[in-house]
Image (cartoon, helix red, strand yellow):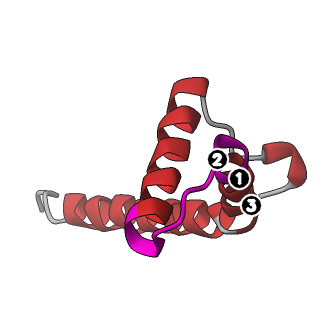
Amino acid sequence: MSKNNKIKLNKQTKESLILEIKNYFNEERDEDIGDLSAMLFLDFIIENIGPTIYNQGIKDAIKYINDKTEDMYSLEIY
């Protein structure tokens, strides 16, 4: 994924993820972090980990489609 193809989240999704991050830090690490810290952490994840997860999703989708295409060959009549 090139710099021009950054993962972009809509405002509602980003706010929801920020809340999830804050809850995680609170519940799992017993730390209270603010909105800015959670947003910066989310931005880090999106920029550094997001592309790997996104690319794996693309590979999984391609495999799924290829598997289904192969299944269609079995429907041929000879």
Residue 43 is situated, as x and y percent measured from the top left of the image, at 73, 52
Specify the farthest residue to the right: 3
- Report which quarter residue 54 is drawn in: bottom right
Residue 28 is situated, as x and y percent measured from the top left of the image, at 40, 72
Q: Which of the pair 31/35 is nearer the observer?
A: 31
Of tags 3 and 1, which is closer to the observer? Answer: 1
Q: Earlier in the sequence, mark 3 or mark 1?
A: 1
Q: Is residue 64 left or right of residue 25?
A: left
The type of residue carrying mark 1 is Ser
The type of residue carrying mark 3 is Phe
How far is disc 3 from disc 1 in space, using C-alphas? 11 Å
Question: Could you tell me which residue is drawn at 21 percent across and 64 percent down?
Answer: 71
Q: Is residue 12 left or right of residue 64?
A: right
Residue 6 is situated, as x and y percent measured from the top left of the image, at 77, 46
How far is disc 3 from disc 2 in space, using C-alphas? 16 Å
Residue 37: image tag: 1
For residue 33: magenta? yes
Q: Dot 2 lies on which element?
A: loop
Q: Dot 1 lies on which element?
A: helix
Q: Dot 3 lies on which element?
A: helix
Specify the farthest residue to the bottom: 29
Residue behind mark 3: 44
Residues marked 2 and 1 touching at CB (< 8 Å): yes
Residue behind mark 2: 34
Which stretch is magenta? 27-38
Q: Which of the pair 73/23 is nearer the observer?
A: 23
Quadrant where the C terminus sits is bottom left
Q: Residues within 10 Å of mark 2 (few under 14, many from 20)?
A: few
Q: Residues within 10 Å of mark 3 (few under 14, many from 20)?
A: few
For residue 36: magenta? yes
How far is disc 2 from disc 1 in space, using C-alphas? 5 Å
